Every structure is written in C-alpha cells, then in structure tokens.
Amino acid sequence: MREVSCPACGHKIEVSQKALSLRCPACTQPIQLDDFVLEQSTEGRLKTMGLVAIAPGCDMSGEVVCGAFRNEGQFEGQVLVYGTAALLAGSQTQASVTARAFEAAGGSTFVGRLMVGPRVGLAPTDAHRFDAPASRDQTARVPAVVILRQTATASPQVV
C-alpha cells in the first residue's frame, strides 16, 4: 500500500501499489497514479500522483504536478510535488519547486524558488495554479539559489 493525497482537496488515501487511477472518496475527483520515466526530451505539462523521473541525459521543460519527482537529467519549469522532490548527482534543475520534502545530492545543481513544508497547502481551487497567492495556511515562499558541488570530502557545499 502507498499513501497519496488528492490534488483537488488534499484528502489522504491509502491505495494499492498496482493501482493506476481512482476517485477521491472525499471530493470524487479522478486521480491518476501512473509513473512516468522520461528518457527523451519532453516539453509540456504532466499531471499524475505517481512518480515523475527524468533519466540521465534527458531534459524536460514545462509544468509537473506529481506525487514524487526525481531528476537525474535537466529540468526547467515549475514542479508541485505532494511527496519528495529528489535531485540526484549530475542533475540540473532551474525551477520553482513546491514539495512536502526536498532532497539534493552532492553534484546536483538547483537554481530557483523552493517551497518545502509538511503540507503542500494549496486551496482546492488553486490546486494546480503555480502562481496562486500565498495564504496563511500555505508554506512560506522562500526564494533560493542553491548550487551543490561535490568536494574531495564528498559532502555537498552550498555556494
């Protein structure tokens, strides 16, 4: 079993690892759970409460709304993640990232705006608007420019 959040109302739902879609029991909105591994250059919008993974050597630009995000290639755009956004070694990310959790490995590069908190915190009417105005129950918006470089001691260095 895995836990997903409804992107429309935020209701948490336990679903089977094999499930591909469902309807939220709280608001009846359909939820896609497909995982996507991008191995070719892609541009556009992608929405799933599953995993979106960008493979090494691949690049994507656009908007992503997902349950988990993993970048091993290059990404430019906006990401709304209801779980963990992970940037692996060698990845380059220039984006506005809103996530429940954020991980950046040594050797990854991130330039952009980062919002991290226990709740993604968007109101149902703003669930997929990246420019939604901040409200009191939203995670604070924090501009960030972080460049992680691998050093001889193998620890990430914030520049």
Image (tube, grey):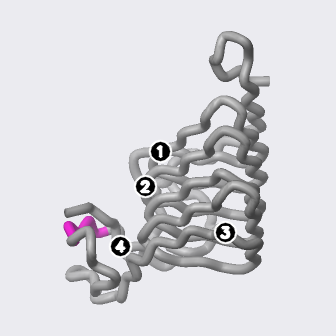
Measure the alpha-carbon separation of dots 4 and 1.
17 Å
When asked about the image quadrant of residue 5, the answer is: bottom left
Measure the alpha-carbon separation of dots 4 and 2.
12 Å
Task: Tell me if label 4 and label 3 are in contact, CB under 8 Å.
Answer: no
The percent position of residue 19, horizontal first and vertical second, equals 27, 78
Residue lying furthest top in this view? Answer: 153
Task: Report if residue 8 is visible in the image.
Answer: no
Which amino acid does the dot numbered 1 rest on? Ala
Query: Which one is earlier in the sequence, the residue at label 3 or at label 2?
Result: 3
Task: Tell me if label 3 and label 1 are in contact, CB under 8 Å.
Answer: no
Q: Which residue is mark 2?
A: 83
Q: How many discs appear?
A: 4
Task: Report if residue 16 is visible in the image.
Answer: yes
Q: Which residue is mark 3?
A: 39
Which amino acid does the dot numbered 3 rest on? Glu
Q: Which residue is mark 1?
A: 101
Residue at horizontal 56 percent and vertical 54 percent from the top: 70
Q: Nearer the viewer, residue 92 or 139?
A: 92
Which circle, 3 or 1, is nearer the viewer? Answer: 3
Which circle, 4 or 2, is nearer the viewer? Answer: 2
Secondary structure mostly taken by the magenta-highlighted segment of the chain = strand
Which amino acid does the dot numbered 4 rest on? Cys
Look at the image and give the residue range highlighted in magenta: 11-15
Which amino acid does the dot numbered 2 rest on? Gly
Measure the alpha-carbon separation of dots 3 and 1.
24 Å
**Helix, strand or loop for disc 3:** loop
Task: Tell me if label 1 and label 2 are in contact, CB under 8 Å.
Answer: yes
Which of the image's four quarters has the N terminus? bottom left
